[in-house]
Image (cartoon, rainbow, N blue to C red):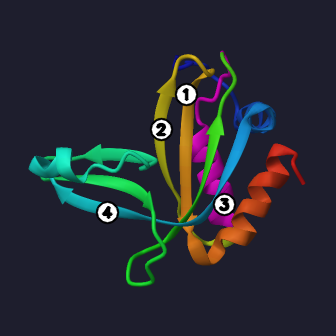
Amino acid sequence: MVNISHETSSEIAMRLERVIQETRLTVYKGAYIFEEFPLGEFKSRADEKALALVRDDQVWSQLIERDDPNEEQFAIWRFHFPNGADNSGFVGWLAMHLKTLFGTGVFVVCGQNSNDGGIFDYWGCPLELSDQIISEVERLVGQK
């Protein structure tokens, strides 16, 4: 459920600092890339181990584990939010925090699992910054 509320910037930050401490964090080992293929090749190319599959009007893009220095490689982590958590604004809040500290953007792919709290997010950052960024995320969650 998307929450609608009117808060000050400091109230938002305080709420989201609590929310991140309530999440379940999973950090994936290895390097991940986005592999693209034409829409018509879905049945033969979709990888059941892909973390995410998204499409536009021309291609499918799947997030798969692959160590390929010829591709843009990413480190991946996932947040599962507890049922009923007001995580509105979370993506922008954490993305800005990481951009301010490390100078890089991130990407986020969201999904829903109604049997496990609802919304979950896969996050990715450049592989070369993974140690620093994941350490900061673990610190925010309270795992460090």
Image position of 25 (left or right of 111): right
Question: Which residue is identified by label 4?
Answer: 35
For marks 1 and 3, the one nearer the N-term is: 3
Q: Which mark is residue 119?
A: 1
Quadrant in which the C terminus is drawn:
bottom right
Amino acid type, label 3: Leu
Residue 13 x, y percent position in the rendering: 74, 39
Element on which disc 3 rests: helix
Q: Separation of disc 4 and disc 1 at Cα? A: 24 Å
For marks 2 and 3, the one nearer the N-term is: 3
Question: Which residue is identified by label 3?
Answer: 98
Q: Which residues are magenta?
A: 84-100
Q: Separation of disc 2 and disc 3 at Cα? A: 18 Å
For marks 4 and 3, the one nearer the N-term is: 4
Q: Residue at x 66, y 17 (%)?
A: 83
Q: Quadrant of residue 132?
A: bottom right
Q: Give neighbour class at mark 1: few <14, some 14-19, many 20+ (Cα, 10 Å).
A: some
Question: Which residue is identified by label 2?
Answer: 110
For residue 7, above or below residue 92? above
Whether residues under marks 2 and 1 lie with C-beta atoms below 8 angstroms apart, the answer is yes
